[in-house]
Image (spheres, coloured by chain):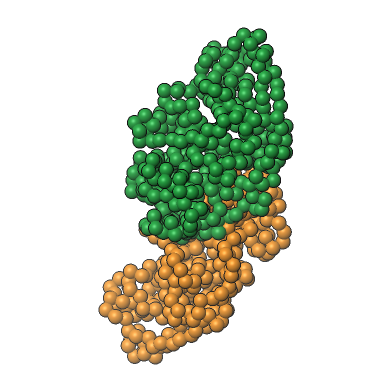
Chain colours: A green, B orange
Amino acid sequence: MTPSALAALVNHQVRLAARPVGLPTPADWQFSTEPVAEPAEGGVLVQVLALSLDPAMRGWMNEGKSYIAPVGIGEVMRAGGVGRVIASRHPGFAVGDMVSGGPGVQEYWHAAADQLARIDLRLGSLTQWLNVLGMPGMTGYFGLMDVGQPQPGETLVVSGAAGAVGQTVGQLARIKGCRVVGIAGGPAKCEWVVRELGFDACIDYKAGSVKDGLKQHCPQGVDIYFDNVGGDILDDVLARIRRRARIVICGAISQYNNTTPVQGPKNYLSLLVNRARMEGIVVFDYAARYPHAVAELAGYLKDGRMKSREDVVPGGVAAFPAALPRLFTGENFGKLVLQVADV
Amino acid sequence: MTPSALAALVNHQVRLAARPVGLPTPADWQFSTEPVAEPAEGGVLVQVLALSLDPAMRGWMNEGKSYIAPVGIGEVMRAGGVGRVIASRHPGFAVGDMVSGGPGVQEYWHAAADQLARIDLRLGSLTQWLNVLGMPGMTGYFGLMDVGQPQPGETLVVSGAAGAVGQTVGQLARIKGCRVVGIAGGPAKCEWVVRELGFDACIDYKAGSVKDGLKQHCPQGVDIYFDNVGGDILDDVLARIRRRARIVICGAISQYNNTTPVQGPKNYLSLLVNRARMEGIVVFDYAARYPHAVAELAGYLKDGRMKSREDVVPGGVAAFPAALPRLFTGENFGKLVLQVADV
């Protein structure tokens, strides 16, 4: 793109205006516009095509120590995304290259080469690169394989089963020989994970007692629980774990918008009785092994053993404030993606 | 002992009369007496000399599924102990042999040979065989070595530091090269673990904020937390764990007499942020390796690198109902032992 063509572009951005109390509201965001400069020597200019909306974003909006610094007030909101190189002053990237990285909630991104990964659309679609081949897929892959350590014949339960991480975890566990039981909200999601993704069963937490559902669908108990939700459901599963069970703590979406303290698992002593383990996972630790996981998961997508579902919200960055809360109300069905530009 | 001598003996027993609500009271127990029969063919008769009083006993008094069946109403209360063989119809045991096992709260015990282990008083005293060389020592040894996996230079925190498990864990961690910080109740216990046992520091939870104490004594954070108490202290430590920390869930004495639900650790998401692990331990799983641990720990006792302290309550089985609650009020100082007969 020529300098004069760049000069015609305007970068629309969404910035954090305030630290939310409870569910984020429109008042927590502010919009800004900036001209789009040429990339500096060694830099790359990316047009953002789609952004990943993730439960973890809620944590990034809070003050305080975590595995990553909080987003500052007035800063462009942090977000993963995919885009197209539209100008490059780095020999490793050419105009037209498709890339993924962390552009934030904006339309154009000045990236350093080491912040970008090239993506191959033969391995998966653009939105799959934000889902099974992206951060949620990597989280599911390493959380399951490294922390969960599935063995054939074991029973795995995953909450948020129709969500981005859950769909990868459940299908991968099935491929690894586990009996797989999902927990999801509503009949549509439950039906989808059973019929389309091949889960053995799914418990609709909105329809009845998760405890009863676990009793019915995990009569021998639970060997691996991949937890995306926390709260009461974590306690219900803790009450049914087997000896030497592994509980992968990936998230606790039920607690992220609390205005009261986090609900600790009152059944945690089940870990003692059952000599079980509860362990946290942060995907960034596995960055060196992403290519291996991407290759394996792309193979499953190609041979049909794995499917994916993305819930793509149109409307560009302006739609971000209204789209994000859908994660916490469970309105999304599949990996929530914000479409920023036409491909 | 001759049949006629046996006939002169009376076995005093303490049986569970009711399932306690909160702290056990005298009304939860009943006393019984039985004549002492000759051992059956293949059996061994043991005179109980001392009994181990353990926090776990409180759990055995509750109904419900656990790692071991509850004690039935009307049954002799379960207890570990040490004693002397006074009659034997098994070739493996002779009159005069000193043994350990699970006699229950009574003065005489008809044991099968496979319920007994011979103990060697050259390796440790009778009460040490209920402490560092007994179940608490084994719990501390395998909980620390197998689950905690201490590395030289790491910081270990142990609660119930002056108790039976705590004293073994702290000293063993020191021997393995860790910086060791105890948590105990009152200045006497804290002073003892620092001056006598060589802990680097001890936080008196009765004197002030555990949180502040951890900040002061673990400025770099906590690599291993060996938890005997649960409750608020578990949350305080969770807030200060380091990356890849291991939390050994051995017990939760603060919660055993609750009449409300167990207090779950509201800071459990620190496991996620820190990629840390919380894992339960039940000592029975390591039975095959007890001899190895006993040999190692007895070596430390002999060369002076390890000390032990037992709090021996006199009065025989009649003193049991009043002695047990001392564990939960923290009145005991060291491993609580009930002396049943003179050695």
Quadrant housing the N terminus of chain A: top right
B191 and B11: which is toward the camera = B11
Residue under the point 48% across and 79% down: B16
Location of residue A32 (image quadrant): top right
Task: Identify the image quadrant of residue B333.
Answer: bottom right
Residue B83 visible, this angle? no
Measured as percent of width and height from the top left, residue B305 is found at 54, 55
Residue at image location 39% in from the left, 31% down from the top: A301
Seen in the picture, residue A341 relative to B58 is either above or below; the reply is above
Q: In the rendering, at what x and y percent does residue A28 appear?
A: 70, 38
Residues B166 and A317: in front is: A317
Residue visible at 70% across and 24% down in the picture = A33
Q: Residue at x 60, y 54 (%)?
A: A263
In this rendered view, identify the residue nearer to me: A104 or B224. Answer: A104
Asked if residue A281 is positioned above or below residue A339 in the image, the reply reads below
Decide: is A270 above or below A254.
below
- B196 horizontally vs A233: left or right: right
Q: Quadrant of residue A56?
A: top right
Q: Does any portion of residue A84 appear in the rendered image?
A: yes
Q: Position of residue B67 (x, y in %)?
A: 43, 63
Q: Is residue B273 left or right of residue B74?
A: right
Which is more toward the observer, B309 or A275? A275
Q: Is residue A42 above or below residue A83?
A: above
